[in-house]
């Protein structure tokens, strides 16, 4: 069987957005699942809008998502010779011709056509002039005037186009730069692409590309056009719905595994499974299971997936990932081991690394800040003897973990004749500043004896009551 070769050909006119990342992922997965090759090609022929920063931004995002490519990145602007060679082939076989119509003339004729109720397509004025190359001349593709072109789309099924609807499109501009539809065909032919998987905003380009393949006598690849991504209001995903850049999600504290898992489910499904590891995806991915209707991106789902992957990750790995987020809070330096212990307690409770960095504040800072309401309610004068008793009992402990802490609390409650529940919340406020946190003994164990005693003393000292 022929080796599968897919490609991802972004135009470097901005960052990698969610839609592009999904296209890239599908091509990568398809290649990996068939033991094929995945090529990265930068389509930078729009010289004015293409920037090096965008190239870098796209590569960074692909690296973050670990969508490794086997070949490239190729740059179209470095392949002008190749397009020239193929343009000459088309000229020689009569499938292309030079056109001297100026932009102004074309504009005028388009205006007239529209006014007369005709389609404003190129009227073929230079078709039979047999012009040679010259300044301000563009090369046009000679489209068949009749007949139909069928796109047998793997995802959408057959789609038929009337050739009469298709323009004699410009394939090389007067500055020698090829246009998208031409360059993409030449690249896909010369790079041996077997499967073109892309967004369905390109469906209307495909019959034009098929005609160019045929004119060049080249074998067609398989085409699969993936439906659009919509936001929750069922309109195409845009900035109105939130971040669209992949790297924004990194900044928002998402893990690449979660975003990848979310992206793959935008269009593809495998029964009602939701969670897939990279290995499972490679094993299970197929184009047959890509749906025909637009898929909906929801933040809720992404948050849910992220919470899942945060729980799954080793605490030591999370330490590394969390450091930049913690740095944003200017917390004092803490050891990896301390942070890992803190993370283990927080991990089940957060959805993002940003939330985690915020939630770990009470572990990291020397002096916690009290939520005024919580302090007023729980750090009362009545608690002073309870805290004193706890302080002396805890000071006597040689080990400081759940097993040794629990009896101290139980006995203190019994002896002072208060309910255990009445002690727990004030202690929580004393240790964390608020009323919500991981389990009390867990946080005490992480904070350690000295910090716990100090915080209890501080809460007892009445400073909290002054608030
Ligand atoms: N450069 C095109 C884009 O970014 C590629 C389309 C294609 O896959 O052919 O939309």
Image (cartoon, rainbow, N blue to C red):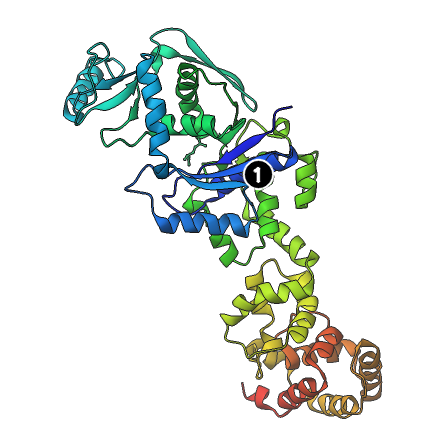
Residue 52 vs residue 377, the one in the foreground: 52
Question: Relative to 19, is 63 above or below?
Answer: below
Residue that appears at 32% across and 29% down: 179
Quarter of the displayed picture in which ligand 1 can be seen: top left
Residue 455 vs residue 30, the one in the foreground: 30
Which image quadrant is residue 49 in?
top left
Which image quadrant is residue 211 in?
top left
Along the horizontal axis of the image, is 419 left or right of 288?
A: right
Residue that appears at 64% across and 31% down: 286
The image quadrant where one finds the N terminus is: top right
Residue that appears at 57% across and 34% down: 267
Residue 108 screen position, x and y as percent? 15, 21
The image quadrant where one finds the C terminus is: bottom right
Q: Is residue 276 visible?
A: no
Q: Residue furthest top?
A: 146
Residue 392 vs residue 34, the one in the foreground: 34
* Residue at which label 1 appears: 28
Residue 381 screen position, x and y as percent? 66, 89
Give the structural element (helix, strand or loop) at label 1.
helix
Which image quadrant is residue 407 in?
bottom right
Question: Relative to 371, is 266 above or below?
Answer: above
């Amino acid at each position: 069987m022929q080796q599968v070769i897919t490609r991802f050909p972004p135009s470097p006119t901005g960052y990698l957005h969610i839609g592009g990342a999904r296209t890239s992922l599908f091509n990568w997965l398809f290649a990996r699942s068939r033991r094929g090759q995945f090529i990265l090609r930068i389509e930078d022929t729009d010289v004015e809008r293409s920037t090096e920063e965008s190239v870098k931004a796209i590569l960074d995002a692909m690296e973050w998502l670990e969508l490794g490519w086997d070949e490239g990145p190729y740059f179209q602007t470095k392949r002008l010779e190749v397009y020239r060679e193929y343009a000459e082939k088309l000229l020689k076989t009569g499938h292309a011709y030079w056109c001297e119509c100026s932009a102004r003339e074309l504009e005028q004729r388009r205006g007239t056509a529209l006014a007369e109720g005709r389609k404003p397509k190129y009227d073929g004025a230079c078709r039979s002039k047999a012009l040679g190359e010259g300044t301000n001349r563009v090369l046009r593709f000679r489209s068949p005037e009749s007949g139909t072109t069928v796109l047998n789309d793997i995802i959408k099924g057959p789609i038929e186009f009337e050739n009469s609807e298709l323009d004699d499109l410009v394939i090389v501009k007067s500055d020698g730069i090829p246009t998208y539809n031409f360059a993409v065909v030449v690249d896909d032919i010369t790079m041996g692409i077997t499967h073109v998987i892309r967004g369905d905003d390109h469906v209307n380009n495909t019959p034009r590309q098929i005609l160019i393949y045929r004119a060049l006598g080249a074998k067609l690849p398989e085409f699969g056009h993936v439906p659009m991504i919509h936001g929750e209001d069922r309109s195409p995903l845009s900035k109105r719905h939130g971040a669209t850049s992949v790297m924004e999600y990194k900044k928002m504290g998402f893990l690449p595994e979660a975003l990848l898992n979310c992206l793959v489910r935008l269009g593809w499904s495998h029964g009602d499974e939701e969670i897939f590891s990279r290995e499972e995806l490679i094993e299970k991915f197929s184009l047959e299971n890509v749906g025909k209707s637009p898929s909906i991106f929801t933040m809720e789902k992404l948050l849910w997936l992220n919470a899942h992957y945060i729980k799954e990750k080793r605490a030591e790995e999370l330490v590394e990932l969390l450091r930049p987020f913690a740095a944003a809070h200017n917390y004092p330096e803490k050891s990896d081991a301390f942070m890992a212990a803190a993370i283990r307690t927080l991990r089940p409770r957060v959805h993002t690394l940003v939330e985690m960095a915020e939630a770990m504040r009470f572990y990291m800072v020397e002096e916690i800040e009290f939520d005024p309401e919580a302090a007023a309610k729980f750090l009362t004068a009545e608690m002073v003897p309870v805290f004193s008793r706890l302080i002396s009992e805890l000071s006597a402990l040689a080990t400081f973990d759940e097993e040794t802490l629990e009896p101290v609390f139980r006995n203190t409650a019994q002896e002072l004749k208060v309910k255990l529940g009445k002690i727990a919340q004030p202690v929580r406020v004393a240790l964390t500043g608020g009323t919500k946190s991981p389990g009390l003994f867990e946080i005490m164990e992480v904070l350690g004896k000295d910090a716990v005693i100090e915080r209890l003393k501080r809460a007892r000292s009445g400073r909290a009551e002054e608030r």
